[in-house]
Image (spheres, rainbow, N blue to C red):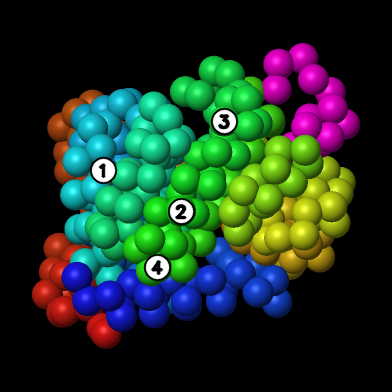
Amino acid sequence: MNRADPIERAKRFRALHDRSRVLLLPNAWDAASACVLADLGFAAIATTSGGVAWSLGYADGEETPLPLVLDAVARMARATPLPLTVDFEAGFGDDPRAVVRSVRAVIEAGAVGINLEDGIRHETLRPIDDAAARIAAAREAAAASGVPLFINARVDNWIIGGSLGEDERLDEALRRARAYLAAGADGIYPIAATRPETIARLCRAIDAPVNIGARPGLPALPELARLGVARVSTATRLAAVALAATREAARRMLESGGFDSLEAGFGYPDMQRLLARPPSP
C-alpha cells in the first residue's frame, strides 16, 4: 500500500471535522453504492455495518467474519478516492489487544476513520472502562500504522437506555464521552439522540465534534448546525431504502405480471460509467 495516500485521505477527513460546517456523511454498503455516493459530490463516505453485513448474508452485530468485512472495506476504498470511515462495531476483538490487531487490519484495508460503539449486540452497555480501553487500543493501532485515524466513539445510551429518563441518559452519555475522549477518541456519536434540546446540550458540553444519526423527522442541516452538530451520518438508512425499493418493485412485478416497476432513473449505463473510469488520485 502507498502510505502517502491513506495518510493524505486521513488528513482530508480529519479536516472535515473543523466544525465550521456540518459534515453530511452517507453510509455505503458495497463498492457500487460507494461509487454512486461519491459521484453525487459528498466529501467523504462511511460504511454501514448493517448494510455490509446484509450484503454478505449476515445479521448486524459482528456476526460477519472479520476477513469478509475487511474485503468489503478494501473494495470500497479502491472504488473511490474519497476518505472512507468504517462502522467497525465494537472493534472485532474479545479484548483490547485483539482490537489493536483488528484496527490495524482495517487501516490496511483503507479506512481512515472508524466508529467504535459501546453497546454489546444492541442488548447492554459495555462498562465504561472496557469501552475506553478499546478506544485506547484503536489509538495505539493508528499510531503504529502512521495513519491519523479519526476515532468516532459511539454512545449507545439512547438505544440501550433501559428505564432511564432523558436527563439520566444525558448525564451518562457525557460521563462516557469524557472517558472516551481521554482514551483517544476524536469525536462522539450519541446515536439515536433526536430531541433538539438534548442535541444542543450534548454539543455544548462535549469539546469535540458531535455526530448525529439521520432519520425521518430529524431537524434539517441548518438547524443542526445551529445546535452545534459537526457531523450527520445515515447509518443503515440508505441501505434500507435501497432494499425497500427492490422489494416493492419485485412485489409489484410478482402481483401484476407486468414490468413497469423495473423503470429506473439510474440504470446500467450509469453504473457502468462510474465503474469504468479509474478513481481520481
**Compared with residue 147, is residue 66 higher up or lower down, i.e. above or below?**
above
Range of magenta residues? 161-173
Amino acid, disc 2? Glu
The label shown at residue 147 is 4
Q: CA distance from mark 1 to mark 3?
A: 23 Å
**Residue 94 position in % (x across, y down):** 39, 27
**Compared with residue 270, is residue 248 higher up or lower down, i.e. above or below?**
above
Amino acid, disc 4? Val
Q: Which residue is mark 3?
A: 130
Secondary structure under tag 3 reads helix
Q: Which residue is mark 2?
A: 140
Q: CA distance from mark 2 to mark 1?
A: 21 Å
Secondary structure under tag 1 reads helix
Mark 2 Cα shell of 10 Å, populated few (<14), some (14-19), many (≥20): some
Secondary structure under tag 2 reads helix
Label 2–label 3 contact, CB within 8 A: no
Say whether disc 1 or disc 3 marks the residue closer to the N-terminus: 1
Say whether disc 4 or disc 1 marks the residue closer to the N-terminus: 1
